[in-house]
Amino acid sequence: MGSTTPAIMSNGYVSTSHFPIISFLSLNLNPIKSISLSNFHSHQKHHHFLSLNLKIRRKNVITASSMASTRKMEEILPPPLDSTSDPPSLFDGTTRIPVLMSLPRFSFAQCRPIFSLLHGTCNNGGYTHIPASSSLSFISKKTLFSYPFSSTFAVSAAATSSTKPVSSSDVPGIRMTLKQRKKARGVTPEYILKCKLDMCSKFNKLDEALRLYDAARVDGTELSLHHYNTLFYLCSNHALNGISDCVIDSLERGFEIFRQMGIDRVVPNEATFTSMARLAACKKDPEMAFDLVKQMKDSGNVPKLRSYAPALFGFLEKGDADGAYKVDAHMKECGVVAEEPELAALLKLSVDARRGDKVYEMLHRLRTSVRQVSEETARIVECWFKSETACGVGMENWDMGKVKEGINMGGGGWHGQGWLGSGKWGVVKTEMDKKGVCSSCGEKLVCIDIDPKETDNFACSLSSLACKKEKLADFLKFQRWLQSNGPFDAVVDGANVGLCDSESFDFRQLAKAVNRLQQISPTKKLPLVILHQNRVYTGPAETTNIKRMLGSWRKAGAIYATPQGSNDDWYWLYAAVRCNCLLLTNDEMRDHLFQLLGNSIFPRWKEKHQIRMTVSKSGLVLHMPPPYSIVTQESESGSWHIPTVTGDDLKIPRQWLCATRVPSLEYKNEVRGESLDLMKFIDSHFEGPSLFPSDLVKQDFAGVLFSYIDSFHKSVTSSFKEDGVNAETGAAFDYIEDALSKLNDGPFFLGQLSLVDIAYVPFFERYIPFLKDVRSYDITAARPMIAMWIQVYKQPEYKVATWQEAHNQLNTEALTLLTSSLVSVQTIIKFISHPQ
């Protein structure tokens, strides 16, 4: 299509001191009467013009092609006419007309439809020269602009007679592209308000958001759910964190906007109710917050954990236990699982309310959903066991058959029959040895079993998730390969092992780990190594030795290269679960991928199957899964062991809370709970050889040794939190060495067996295995008196003789109490009350 020779009527001359370029828009418009070029003199020196000839392309889409005009302005514009004379009729209604246009400065960072430039006001049917209100630009795939453009253009009155932007429907034969239509739809007052409110939310600007809201109400802008939720979020956020004046203002405006939302009949969602519940909690009205959650459920919205937090913590702040328990019941009814912050808050409220039954319930819920508690939660548990209320709860006579049945049904580690025993609790921070024996009470923790059906279901759910996240064909191929080459005794996360404590991938380290796993395997089969194909076929893998090693693994069917773009985590985890074997990786498996697996079976499975490794100068060390479950455990005797998040059992031992009933004895309505008082009572109330010396010097020395027991225990256990044995622990054993050397009447503290020996023996029986196995520390080295004392009290003939003497006064149950000093004595209370 050729260009049309322009014949433009103007009411003034244009200066030609600079060489301009004329712009044309070939449009199907009505005949024009006149063109006004006012203000053109003041702009033309700074502008360049481009000749545009709009052409109808395929699919009837308008594009623009540039044509630089080299003709002078005088050759294009006709001589001026008298302003009073009527312009002649140049074209009929179907003729293409040129439109003089000065384009805005062009920016390739933006892409705006050319028809969005056609806006302005009417000028009596003529063309009007309109300054652009903003820096606009446009681009087309067929057009490339390289000149700086001005911000002035002229359009016809017909094109500017409407206040709305010209759309494709206003011009016959013109259709905008999909991207242009989307952008045109987006430029609405509602969209602009949304963008501005989002920025207020990002920078926490409540005042500006409220100003925008008020302006929108005045302008009649329709507010959507997103607008309202942004405002509610800002109001609740300022109410929670602002100063007093800001809190009052945000509360009032928040509820005012919520009422307006109801008037506008905008349907709220979960986020709306949650924000309003937070505002109610800031108003110190947890009842209103709870009612909002109930309305949420009645309106068909599913409440989330965050929805209950304002009401729950509001009741907790007021000390309203019944209200908090109602919120908790509603959560369980809606299937919302409480996490540690909520359970810890309910536990503290139950402790303060002296509700032993609720404390018992919360401890078991922590066991199932949290497993290892934080230090803050551990302090709440410790406060409970040290309280007077805890001393008074519990059954003195219980059915041991039901307790054992509960343990078997639960898989071990708990029975759920309630508090067992009565009397004072002893609560200490302790650690477990490699076999799971408590260094405080000597009780051995159990390994909680996983039902095989749970493992199968877990493997199926894992496969389903992996197929959704990975390419289906790739993962199905791996499943078929695993079925034909498996099962394996162990799976290795190759990338994690090769990069452990190494700046670059170390194939030698990986080979050592593989060989070590093969040695401990019952079938001596190579473990399955999962590696990305880039590490298998490129880089260091191309060297001769590494290539030979990988080839041998590939020949044995012990390596799988994950395809390009895949996440190898899915592959090694699925292989380990499907084969029900060990998994070597230091990956803590805490990211979003593993959160998809939930907290039901995955933490238990990981605990029993994950092997971790450390690398030091001495070489590579594999840390096998512990033979016990690191989870809150309730024993059949009624004691509790609660693990904390402090320590990892690799470099730092994990810290546990040990809560056991202190040995107690009731005689003539008088209760004695301390072990030392109990032993003294038995020694003084029964005939026979006394276990307490009559010599005054020895009595004073015994008192000093008794008073040192607590200090001795703290000094020794201080090394449990460190890598080795510190000087404080060594000094404590040196003190005992000196005490045994002070009197030369025999191998015991006071020469002969006494209550002092009985008090210290249980501590040594617990410290010796732990320090020897875990810390590689021999307490008898360079301490001959301690070595002889231990050797004597462990002699079988000496024990028999001692037990025979004691049996003349007490029966076997009382003797057990006498020699252990820490075992519950409820089995001999009747004997003490009615001595035979």
Image (tube, rainbow, N blue to C red):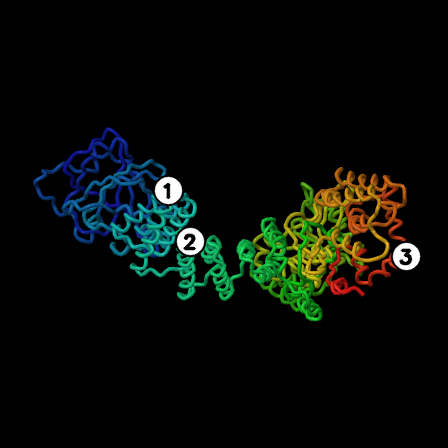
Amino acid carrying label 2: it is Ala
Q: Quick one: 696 or 397, which is closer to the camera?
A: 696
Q: Is residue 80 left or right of residue 574?
A: left
**Residue 523, quarter of the rendered image:** bottom right
The spot of residue 812 in percent (x, y) is: 82, 63
C-alpha span from label 2 to label 3:
70 Å
Residue 281 is labelled as 2
Q: What is the three-letter code of the residue carrying label 3?
A: Ala
From the image, tell me which residue sits under label 3. 801
Residue 721 is at least partly visible in this image: yes
Q: Is residue 437 above or below residue 149?
A: below
Q: Residue 826, relative to residue 777: is it above or below? A: below
Q: Name the secondary structure under disc 3.
A: helix
Other residues around mark 2 within 10 Å, as few (<14) / some (14–19) / many (≥20): many
The mark nearer the N terminus, 1 or 2, is 1
Q: Which residue is mark 1?
A: 144
Q: Nearer the viewer, residue 611 or 80?
A: 611
Which quarter of the picture shows residue 687? bottom right
Do the numbered discs 1 and 2 sit on residues whose CB atoms are within 8 Å?
A: no
Residue 597 visible within the image: no
Disc 3 residue crowd, few under 14, some 14–19, many 20+, Cα 10 Å: few
Tell me which corner region of the image, top left, top right, bottom left or bottom right, holds residue 169.
bottom left
